[in-house]
Amino acid sequence: MPNDHPHEFIPAYVLGALDADEAQRVRAHLAVCHACRAEVASFQAAISISPHTVPGQDPPQRVKRQLMARVAAGSELQPEPAQPTPPPRPCLPPSRLASVVAACAVVLSFALGYVAADSRMRAEALAAQLAESRREVAALQARLGEDEQFVAFIASPQTVSQILPPTGRAGAASAQMYMQPGHTGVALVVRGLPQPPPGKVYRLWLASETERVALGAFTAGAGDLAQFHAHAPRPMDTYAQVMVTLEEGHARSPSGEVLFEIDL
């Protein structure tokens, strides 16, 4: 065998389907043959990409003895050749060859299934990333629309502005309110407020003689700049007072922590 390449034995050798004598003969050949070592390496690489491998199965010894007895009986019936012929290249017994072919088929099936599953997972991950990107774009478009409405409201000729005087709790922060007499729209721009403590928000209140209305909550934005735009239940010039307070997120009435207030 060292001079005759054992191509038929290599798949069985890689899968561990050879007996000890056959495996030793293949190893002896691989020690001196670079081409066959490369072929073994390619089979091992194909098997390694599958998460499962098929263990080799040796046929019972009685099956092998019966097969060899039939081969010997068949050779006795044939006449001796007139001239000596070179010995045939070694090949696997039919039963062993069938098991090797089946094992290779199973390994190839697992390998193809692994590649298909990996491609499917990559496609699903890309689809999820695309969906997330679309949601982010939609959110940015919505924010851009809100910013455009905010700017348009402030720049309108009907809009008047008022500075909200700070209390001692506002520190160095400042606030300016924009409103339109006879209309419900109101916008607020606050500078210098820090992010509120966990569980608290800044809230804008409108007060009249009979009620106090919470228009909404906001937090400090980038660069300590916060802006808020809302619509009151009634026209803004029907209210008597405006306040900005620091509240718990679920507060239904203004607390004593007033940051800005003004009488309209």
Image: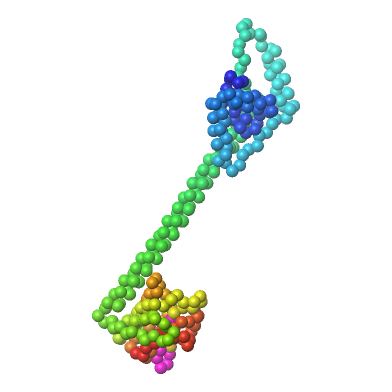
Q: Magenta stretch containing residue 208, yes or no?
A: yes
Asked if 179 appears above or below 150 in the picture, the reply is below
Magenta-tinted stretch: 203-211
Q: Can you say which quadrant of the picture contains the N terminus?
A: top right
Asked if 86 appears above or below 107 in the picture, the reply is above
**Residue depicted at x 48% and y 82%:** 247
Look at the image and name its color scheme.
rainbow
Tell me residue 114's x, y (percent).
Answer: 54, 43
Task: Give the quarter of the image for residue 68.
Answer: top right
Asked if 114 appears above or below 127 in the picture, the reply is above
Residue placed farthest to the bottom in the image? 209
Task: Give the quarter of the image for residue 30.
Answer: top right
**Residue depicted at x 53% and y 26%:** 35
Kindly tell me whether residue 243 is visible in this rendering. Answer: no
Tell me residue 16's x, y (percent).
Answer: 65, 32
Asked if 124 appears above or below 212 in the picture, the reply is above
Residue placed farthest to the right in the image? 62
Residue placed farthest to the front in the image? 172
Tell me residue 260's x, y (percent).
Answer: 40, 85
